[in-house]
Image: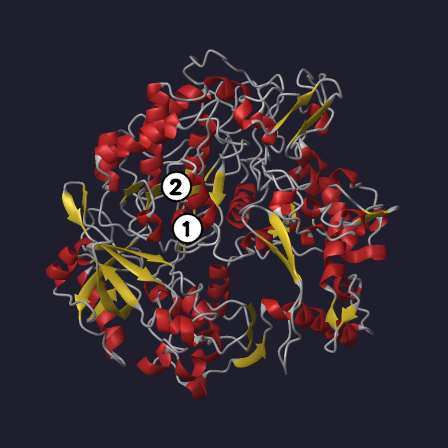
Amino acid sequence: MAECHPVGFQWVMEAKARGAKVIHVDPRFTRTSAVSDLYLPIRAGADIAFVGGLINHVLSSGSFFKDYVLAYTNAATILTEDYADTEDLDGVFSGLNREHRYYDFDTWCYQGGEEVKPASGEHQDPDAQQRTRRRLRQAGRGEAHGCGGAAAYPTPDTDDTLQHERCVFQVLKRHFARYTPEMVEQVCGVPRDLFAQVCELVTANSGRDRTTAFVYSLGWTQHTVGVQYIRTAAILQALLGNMGRPGGGILALRGHASIQGSTDIPTLFDLLPGYLPMPFADGNEDLDAYVQAESVPRGFWANTREYLVSLLKAWWGDAATAENDFCYDYLPRLTGSHSTYDTVLAQLDGTCTGYFLFGQNPAVGSANARMQRLGMAKLDWLVVRDMVMIESATWWKDGPEIETGELKTEDIGTEVFFMPAAAHTEKAGSFTNTQRLLQWHYQAVEPAGDVRSDLWFTYHLGRRIRAKLSASADEADRPVLDLTWDYPTTGTQADPDADAVLAEINGRGPDGPLSSYTQLTDDGATTCGCWIYCGVRAGGVNQAARRTPWRQQDWVAPDWGWAWPANRRVLYNRASADPDGKPWSERKALVWWDEEHRRWTGADVPDFVADRPPDYRPPAGATGVDAISGADSFIMQADGKAWLFAPAGLADGPLPTHYEPQESPFRNLLYSQQHNPVRQIIRHRENRYQPSGNQPGSEVFPYVTTTYRLTEHHTAGGMSRFLPYLSELQPAFFCEVSPQLAAERALEHLGWATIITARNAIEARVLVTERIRPLNVQGRTLHQVGLPWHWGPNGYTAGDAANELAHLALDPNVHIQEVKAMACDIRPGRRPRGAGLRDLVQEYQQRAGITDETGTEM
């Protein structure tokens, strides 16, 4: 956090100055480690074992916050007899379809409840056609129902004594029992004495009067089990009572100032704004079918129709009527996974012939960068919008494949259009950061010359397309022609007014701008471009532009910017009070029930039904928001509980399980199942996988490499490698190795090294440092190689791209790449030039015995 988010890290340092303990767990000793109270080096790819060990300690020592766990989690809920755990099946869960690599969720049910409905909205059907449909849906569904609320259990059986052998609490204890300190040491390389210190610090600082926060970043997401990494932390935090309370929770550090915003109003292929699932081509035939499949009977997801109809009205205005399903048919449909990596396959296959890149640089910034360039070489046209000539704009004339002779400029048919893009200082708009906080920034200066904002480009491109289609009688053109595509413009370049776009996102009703998503209706009377953002322009005022200094308001600072939803700063903050509505601790009071005024009140906006008393219990048959009891703190869940056990919504299991990375020098010590059995495998000749664990050939790649960021550079380098000051501060691509590894492989400090995987080989300057320490893993020494990933051939400081080494094995939930833990080899000297580079890679493939099937096994 200190390296990559130094401004935000100010608050960690201020907390430390007031007595907070800072623990840092990372393969490298960084600027964060240097100011931490405790630093633990860890093997990349082993964090589920580490956090699972913390869970085991909490459960076995009785350190969990029992009153919180009983009231606010599903710990007491009893599972059906059909459920079988990894403890029963040696590393997999019941319902695994090995032939087609997916889980049926039927056995992950609550006893006495309704059938579990997975996040795709699809119930299991024995018919073969339905199984195929289910598989396609599972492949396509990522962060649908981002709060995990797609299941219904009106009256599940429970055991408040937590003694029933099939209650979630006992299942959890059995599942994590093998995650002992000894196992953590062998799997993670973390000494037992250091691990014991973490156990003591975390448990002592959690409970009724204290809270502990977890902070993670891409090191926890870019894995084939990335979603389960965060799930493990969520389980731990729920057990300790750290969710929904000040100073608790889980904070995700993002790679960009508005990555949260780009998932809220999504760049993700499987979502509509506000985490509404994108409809499928098969099974969401009309609006009623969509709502039935994707909404739930209890909680705020029951209002899915209101959210979607208001979105359709915002997009298609008067054309959207009740008679035509509010233009629901205009929405595109999913047929499976359409992630960026599936798109690359479509380029290589010739089925994707055109491509827009807005602020993306896949030629160096995406996993298996070589595959990205080969895909772009198959396109008819490519539009690159960026501030500088990034590698994704120039690969056709100076990319690595031109050097090796595999591509020739004159043979590439791709027509590349470079459209210069405006910087944030040259446009107005909002950032939504990881805190869900929208902060508005104003335009400082108009862009010069041909430079334009993305908003300008998209709006005016849309106008030109509509003009070309204006005389069309083709029904296929109606979705474009009927769009509400008329915004006021400002400045000499006729830039669309960003505040007007924000007003459309906020939404309107019959009486003007809306102030809350609870005002949305399903009859077409309201519009809203993103239901969770409803209220950002309450009263017609840009709430995101508020800048009241913190000294002039209370400690929650509600008048600085605006946080979704409803300007709440802590999600699920009803959990900061006990079931009776009283704060668990006066020291940690956030919201509470005001009996005199019969309302929830406090320092934050209550994340609850404002006038619902703690003793309210829904009548039989209640649905929607009316079915939320006065003690259901987690209101986006169908059962109102934090899920220690996830009966639906996750493609790879109801509980986190340690699996080895796709490419690992070690076998899985916990189970015979080596890898995540339902990880997404992309089979292609340019995406060879390496042998792993005990497999023959794994010794060819004996080391682990991990990628990371530097303070001085930004993502793929387009905003930093082209700036002389930042290029001087970090002037060369380097690999970070320990003195022991340098001695073992004859690597010289500041000399050259070549790093090799089954995909490619790169060269880097050698940085010999004790910041990366050898670890003892499974009785032998493991060396790790650190690689910053900002470099490419262009700019003031040029170098090979770390992503040349990466494979495409993906998390099955969100289709993210595993680049934080890869097996590799390293040798002294520079890599070969020309055709010799591919010869070296092929030599390694042959030595390791790599075939089409290597690494694809279950």
- Residue 227 visible somewhere in the drawing: no
Total count of labels: 2
Query: Which three-letter amino acid code belongs to the residue tagged 2?
Result: Arg
Q: Which residue is mark 2?
A: 98
Name the foreground residue: 64 vs 546.
Answer: 546
Which residue shows up at 74% across the image and 25% down it? Answer: 611
Residue 723 falls in image quadrant: bottom left
User: Residue 539 location, x and y as percent?
Assistant: 80, 47
Q: Which mark is residue 1?
A: 1
Label 1 Cα neighbours within 10 Å, binned few <14 / some 14-19 / many ≥20: many
Identify which residue is drawn at 65% across, 43% down. 552
> N-terminal of the two: label 1 or label 2?
1
How is the rendered protein coloured?
A: secondary structure
Could you tell me which secondary element the residue under label 2 belongs to? loop
Name the outermost residue toward the front. 551
In the image, residue 393 above or below residue 483: below
Mark 1: amino acid? Met
Q: Nearer the viewer, residue 304 or 86?
A: 304
Location of residue 17 with respect to 9 vertically, above or below: above
Query: Residue 494 at what x, y percent from top left?
Result: 75, 74
